[in-house]
Structure formats: C-alpha cells, structure tokens
Amino acid sequence: MALVCLPNELLEMVITNVLPEGFESLATTCKRLYLLCSPFIKPYSTLRHSWKRFTYHEEPEDLPASIGSAYNLITRIALEPYVARYIQHADLTFDSLLRRRWSAQYNPEVHRSDAVNRLFAESPYLKQAGLDWQDYHAKIEEDHQAVLRYSQHAAAFLLTLLPNVKSLILPKRWKPSEATGILIDAVVQENEHSQHVRCTGLSLSMVTDLEFSASLDPKTECKLDWARPFVALPCMRSFYGPSCVAINNSNSIASKTPSRSFATTLDTVHLVSCCIDEVSIANFLSCATQLRTFRYSHTTKGNDSHQSWNLCGFLMSIQDTTGAHLEGLSVTIRELRGSIFPGKACLRGFKRLRKLELPLEISVCNVNSATASTTATTPPESLDTYDSSTHHRTLIDNRPSISDLVPASVSQLSLVSSGTEDHASALETMCQDFASRKAQLSPALEKIFLSREATADVAYKAQCDKLREETENAGVVLDLRPWLSFATIAWVEGK
C-alpha cells in the first residue's frame, strides 16, 4: 500500500519515527505530507539549530542548561533520547574544561536518575564488551572525584550514543584506559559486522572525519595507536592527528590486531607536530589503499635533548606503502632537536603524485650520500662528467638530480629551507641544468614554491636567483616566499 494512502493518524506516527534523519525528505514528498509535517517543522528546526554542531558550553544565566562535560550530555540524552540523533558534528575538545562551578558538572542525585541508569543498563555496547554497567558507572563517579574531574569512561560511553555524527573531535584530555578501549572496540566491531547488512542506528557508523584536539607543544604527546579503532570505521575518510608519537613500532596500529584492516577508507591524513619513525609510519599506512593526500610535520617529542630522525627512511616507507595511489605528499620539519640520519631517498616510485612538499634537508642527504660514494671510488676530476646531448650522466657520476626526488608526474613542488649554505649547495646540485633537462626529467612540473627568508645565507639567496632564471627559461613559475608566510600548495581541491 502506498504511503500516502495511510490514514493521518498512522502518517503522524511515521513522521515522529523519521525525525530527524528523514524528516526533510518526507516533508517534501507531496502536499499532503507537507501539511501533516507542518506542526513539526518549527521544533525540528530549533533542535537542528541547537544540536547539529555540538560543542561543550556554559549558560551563566542557566547553569542547569550548561553542558560542560560528557556526563552532562549523557544525562541530557537519557532524558531526551532524540537529542543524540540531531548531532552531526561533535566537537568534544573542551570536555570538563569549561567549569565555572564544579557542582554543575556532576550531581549524583541528578545523574543517577532512573533514566540514566536505564541508559547504561541497556547499552548493547557495554554488554558486547563484557563490561558490567554498574562497575562502569562507578568508574565515572571515581573519575569525577579526581582533581581534573574529567572522565575518560564518560567520554568513551558518549561515543556509543551518536548514530548520526559525521565529524568527531576527541576531547583534549582523551587518554584511553583498558575498559574504555574495549568499549570503543565493541562499537567498531559492531560496525564492521554490519557493513554487509542493512543496519541503521549504529553509533559512529557515519563518521567520516576524525580529529585529535591535542596542542602542538613539543611536550604534548598522543599515541598514534589511539586512532586505531576509529580509522577502522567503515566511512572514515580523513584523520587529523596533532602531536602523535610512534617510535620503535611501540604504538603500531597494524601489529596490535593483525586480523583487522585499518585505514582502508582513508582519503586524507594530516599529522602535524608528530614524532613517528619509518617503521611505525609504514605500519600505519600499510592498509591505506585509498589514501590520496598525506601531510606530516616532524617535531622532537619528550625530554630527550637529542633525538635523530631517519628522514630518508621515512619517505621511502611512505613510497613503499602508498606509491601506487598517493596524489599529494608533504613532509616537513617543524622542530628537530637532533640530527638527520645519513641516507639517500629516491622517490621515483610514486606513480600518481601531483603535489609534493619536502624539506631541503632531503636533498642535502642525497648530495652527501653521492659525495661519500663517489669520492670513495672515483677520482675527483670525474665528479663533473655530464653529457648534455643525451641528458644523462656517466656511471661514475652519482650526483643526485631533481628527478631523484621529484617524480615525473608532479606539477606543484614546494621546497622548505632555512636558507643555510649547505642548502644552497644542495639546491644547486638538485636543479643543475634544470632548463635543458626539465622536459625529460620533470615534464609535468608547472610551479615551484621555494622558501627564502630574509636571514638566509648569501649563497642561498644567490642560488635562488639563479634558479629563477632557470625556471623562467623552462616555462616554470618560481614563487619565492619567507617560510613564516609559506602558504603554498592548496591541499584541498578548490582552495
């Protein structure tokens, strides 16, 4: 029987059941349904405006209406379950951080109401995780008695109640415990089991964007492994992870649960001010078969005054895991307290890369590697051998060229430099005879962004000017900018 043939009483029941997800579609189906939906339009619009983009907030004039913590929101959902279905963008950054009155955050008489108890007792995720709801709730009470008053248990349980959320920013104080990790795993496993079954209402099933809300301070650390369950969600497309740490494979996502595929749906990853080694990044990206854009900036983390980084190995790990499909790559150095391991990188294995950003330190590594290799086996007078008619170097000349670091498919290149003398030498070697060799080695290259600070070495500035002449002759645009105002490649299409 056609929907419009139903009596008004049944249609009104249908309307209340499709709120909020299908309300707009239903209301615009026909004139009769629109008239029946009319009484619901104003409350729907009000709730949608209030809850679609949720963030923790205080109401100084009405403290009971304040929602400053995960438990405040859980209580509101227990009393008004439909609220959770309106939330599409959840910014949980300031969980338990906006508190003008401590008592407004957790009141046992209010928060242990029958509705709240029932919400915990009937949670399918707590049952699937094998967690006793009363013990779990007791942990929340203990958390609220601590100095910070932040509850990881409440923050995790909240994530079992959000079926329509699309973008998720985790709390600044997010730090998984054993119980909360098991609970989040239960949510993800339920989503995985239901991928091939027509199932609606699963929490986090629609999440496409995940962010950590940690600061970029070198002392701040988030384990990369904390992203493990979330990047396994079926619709996850982007991950922004500031201050992530993964060294010596200690926080390897892939090694924790080898049977599960992680990050298979990821399109974009941005790891800023992170400290990750080549083994851990390989594990993280090993299943990211749809990844198109990867951006990373390195920062030395912890109290170690000296911590070296294998930049060449890091880049080669990215190439080994994503070289067949990656289209945009940025690897830069934000703050390095230590040195870069000697090595050599060749990025010709990237087949579809169009946008590339690198620190000139990588060119320095290649130049040093070539120099060490050549001087050990070849007379010094052989270092400059080059056949301009064939655009090829002889076997005894191992000096790197732009093609070593810039795949032929790249159209936009950004080189980040502090302007030191060794960077000038590396830039000269990398771009030698650029005009005459561009068509063969970098046929797609259209624009180069190059940082040149006012305090840069004289030799570096001179090399920048020389490169400008080379690029003009080759028909390539060279954009020289100071690093501090280095807005270069548009990593998001259309920007």
Image (cartoon, grey):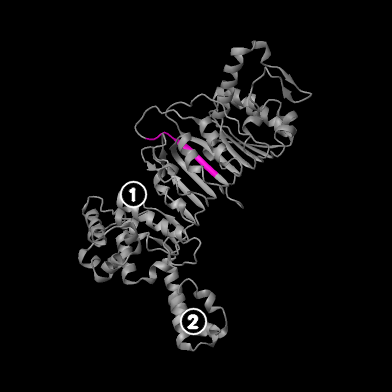
Give the residue at x 64% y 22%: 399
Residue that mark 1 sits on: 176
Q: Amino acid at mark 2?
A: Cys
SS assignment at label 1? loop
Is residue 450 within the magenta segment? no
Foreground residue, 61 or 477? 477
Residue drawn at x 74%, y 34% is 439
Q: Nearer the viewer, residue 298 or 4?
A: 4
Above/below status of 180 relative to 474: below
* Range shown magenta: 294-301
- Residue 104 picture quarter: bottom left
> Which residue reaches farthest front?
259
**Above or below 331: residue 95:** below
Mark 2 is surrounded, within 10 Å at the Cα level, by few (under 14), some (14 to 19) or many (20 or more) other residues, namely many
Mark 2 — residue?
37
Counting residues from the N terminus, which is met first, the one under dot 1 or under dot 2? 2
Q: Main secondary structure of the magenta part?
A: strand
Q: Amino acid at mark 1?
A: Pro
Q: Is residue 300 magenta?
A: yes
Residue shown at 31% from the left, 67% from the top: 122
Q: Is residue 471 left or right of residue 455?
A: right
Q: In the current view of this chain or complex, which residue is farthest to the bottom?
A: 7
